[in-house]
């Protein structure tokens, strides 16, 4: 079913994200807050879907759409304000 496929895709995405977090965590010089600040170019203290889209495009990821980044933000947006603060990031 479509719902099953969606749930499997979400689960696989979560596994992939966790693997990437572990890899980054092994790097002594990786600073999560610096990464957050790099994406938050307007220095608002938040990252929204457009910030993420611009960051991705600036780094060669051109296939993602604004809808893709919106749904990604929505997934991690704990307080439903359509943006991520550093804690949610």
Image: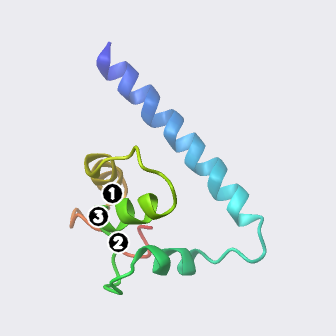
- Quadrant in which the C terminus appears: bottom left
In the image, 37: left or right of 81? right
Q: CA distance from mark 1 to mark 3?
A: 10 Å
Which residue is rendered at x = 36% and y = 51% of the image?
Answer: 72
Secondary element type, mark 1: helix
Rendered position, 86 above or below 68: below
Residue 73's mark?
A: 1
In the image, 44: left or right of 86? left
Q: Front-most of 6 and 40?
A: 40
Q: CA distance from mark 1 to mark 2?
A: 9 Å
Which residue is rendered at x = 33% and y = 57% of the image?
Answer: 73
Query: Mark 3 Cα within 10 Å, few/some/many (few <14, many 20+)?
Result: some
Which residue is rendered at x = 47% and y = 51% of the image?
Answer: 61
Name the residue beneath numbered marker 2: 47
Which mark is nearer the camera, 3 or 2?
3
Contact? badges 3 and 2 (CB < 8 Å): no
Residue 31 spot, x, y in % from top left:
64, 78
Residue 50's mark?
A: 3
In the image, 10: left or right of 66? right
Residue 52 spot, x, y in % from top left:
38, 63
């Amino acid at each position: 079913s479509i719902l099953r496929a969606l749930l499997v895709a979400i689960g696989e995405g979560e596994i992939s994200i966790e693997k990437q977090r572990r890899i980054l965590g092994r790097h002594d010089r990786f600073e999560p807050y610096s990464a957050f600040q790099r994406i938050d170019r307007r220095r608002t203290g938040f990252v929204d879907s457009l910030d993420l889209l611009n960051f991705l495009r600036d780094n060669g990821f051109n296939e993602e759409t604004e809808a893709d980044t919106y749904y990604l933000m929505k997934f991690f947006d704990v307080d439903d304000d359509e943006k991520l603060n550093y804690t949610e990031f």
